[in-house]
Amino acid sequence: MHMPITISTDRLRVEMLCADDTPVSHRFDRSCFITDVTLDGKHKFCVPEQYDQSRVTSFGAGICAEFVWQEISGDVRAGEKFPKFGTGLLTQIEDNAPYRMFADYELEAYPITAETGADFARFCHDIPLCMDTGAKIYREASVRDNMLTIYTTIENTGARVLQLAEYNHNFLSIDGLPVGPGYLLHIPFDGTLEKIAQCGFTQKSRGEVIPGLMLPQENKTIAWGKGMDGRTFFKETESPDILPMARYFWKLTHENSPASVEETVSFAPRRFALWGIEHCICPEVFVGIYVKPGEKQSWSRTWTFRA
């Protein structure tokens, strides 16, 4: 196990996993896997996917990306390999089955090269040809004052059009405060925010709706009406319900902390998902990827941490 990569400014300290380490799972991109963010030496934001390891988990933490291409695994039979961008080649476990995040796949990890400095870390995935699919993925995490930015470029080096998506899991809290009353989540681009009142469930079943767990407020904001013990929430917003905006962002605050976190993206979201449990709130903004052979696509995400 290597020492974590640390980049920092006078205000912000960011820790991420070393890309040479054994992957934590077959889901998450090994580059720019951020496990800790500290603002002004005291405010914390990153938490693990699960504290209770008796629950199902894929060992995510903090700010970590995932590339999603569900359809490609449907083209292969059991024992054959298919690409999972960001991690490696996976061995199919069932003929033509869709990718399943909690399945036990054999992983052949992609090589990643890295270059680091005091305030940046750059990574390059060199994805070999498989199923006529190949790519180079360039990712950089850099910090400036109280802001963290992740830049991504994907270059198609294969013969097949790349049609997938990428999103950042944000396993977040503010200063470790448990999820519940006091938190506010502002999502100005979500055109179906009123549906949040029907999106709180027991952890045993999404068929057991908990009225009043989460409540829509004025100005495109969500508040928590109840604590989250034994509860969860999940909501999806697809592209037709993403409102056109000059700037796409969300912002998380808590009335008992001066700290806040805001993510701004450089693209119109293809999809937005919101998930969480007792200790973390996970807003997930998806970018659509469509890259023809020989072409490139780039995007960025910036997190601003305030106190």
Image (tube, rainbow, N blue to C red):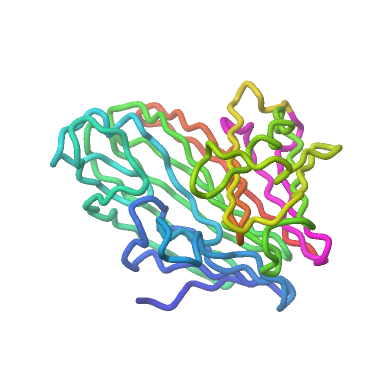
Q: Is residue 263 magenta?
A: yes
Q: In this rendering, would 211 be left or right of 126?
A: right
Q: Image quarter for residue 273? A: top right
Q: Residue at x 63, y 42 (%)?
A: 200
The residue at 22%/33% (across/down) is 131
The answer to whether 109 appears left or right of 10 in the picture is left
* Residue 111 position by quadrant: bottom left
Q: How many marks?
A: 0
Left/right placement of residue 88 relative to residue 211 reads left
* Viewport quadrant of the C terminus: bottom right
Residue at 60% from the left image edge and 64% from the top image edge: 46
The residue positioned 70% from the left and 64% from the top of the image is 174
Residue 129 in the magenta stretch? The answer is: no
In the rendered image, residue 114, in percent from the top left (x then y), is placed at 41, 63
Q: Which residues are magenta?
A: 245-271
Q: Which is more toward the observer, 275 or 10?
A: 275
Q: Position of residue 107 (x, y in %)?
A: 24, 53
Q: Is residue 236 above or below residue 223?
A: above
Considering every residue shown, the one lying at the far left of the view is 79
